[in-house]
């Protein structure tokens, strides 16, 4: 209760701007969800950082922490703002009538089991259009 009295003085906008892991812990403390908080801390200690689910909107999922989805609203589990795309374009050229783009791209704080474990697409959007054209991009090594 003393912790929650202290947390009452914190601006909610500050909390919503936090990274997902500290924000989830903060919300679990506020909800008095001690069982789920301890389970989340144990999962972190064992190296379980959770999973990301969803096609358009990305949400944190913690299969090892039972009940976290019932305690917290789905909005609290959203992690889109934590997923920052890092890109580096080294080469743009035409080869044999084909456009060649060479570079690297990664999403920070996301691990992939292998090079071919994710779908990559290039989104091209015409000026004034609302709909992008999605082109599958193969890995070239």
Image (cartoon, rainbow, N blue to C red):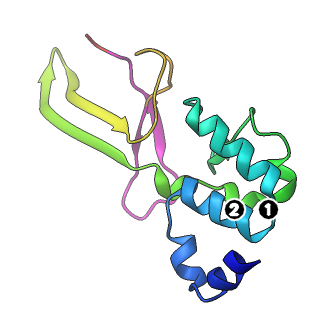
Q: Which disc, if any, is residue 73?
A: 1
Q: Pinpoint residue 27: horizontal percent, then vertical percent.
A: 69, 66
Q: Pinpoint residue 101: horizontal percent, then vertical percent.
A: 21, 29
State the extent of the magenta-drawn residues as a range: 121-139
Under circle 2, the secondary element is helix
Circles 1 and 2: CB distance less than 8 Å? yes
Front residue (pair 34, 98): 34
Q: Horizontally, is 126 left or right of 14 in the view?
A: left
Q: Identify the image quadrant of the N terminus.
A: bottom right
**Which residue is at 59% across, 32% downward?**
48
Residue indicated by mark 2: 76
Res. 49 in view: no
Q: Is residue 94 above or below residue 21?
A: above
Q: Pinpoint residue 9: horizontal percent, then vertical percent.
A: 60, 89
Q: Within the image, what quadrant is residue 22 found in?
A: bottom right
**Which residue is at 72% across, 65% downward?**
29
Res. 107 in view: yes
**Residue 18 among those drawn in magenta:** no
Q: Within the image, what quadrant is residue 47 found in?
A: top right
């Amino acid at each position: 209760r003393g912790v929650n009295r202290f947390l009452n003085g914190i601006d909610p906008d500050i909390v919503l701007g936090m990274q997902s892991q500290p924000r989830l812990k903060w919300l679990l403390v506020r909800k008095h969800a001690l069982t789920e908080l301890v389970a989340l801390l144990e999962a972190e200690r064992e190296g379980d950082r959770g999973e990301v689910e969803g096609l358009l909107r990305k949400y944190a999922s913690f299969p090892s922490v039972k009940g976290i989805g019932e305690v917290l609203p789905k909005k609290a589990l959203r992690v889109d703002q934590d997923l920052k795309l890092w890109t580096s374009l080294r080469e743009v050229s035409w080869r044999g009538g084909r456009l060649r783009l060479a570079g690297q791209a990664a999403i920070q704080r996301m691990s992939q089991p292998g090079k071919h474990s994710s779908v990559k697409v290039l989104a091209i959007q015409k000026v004034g259009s609302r709909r992008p054209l999605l082109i599958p991009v193969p890995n070239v090594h």
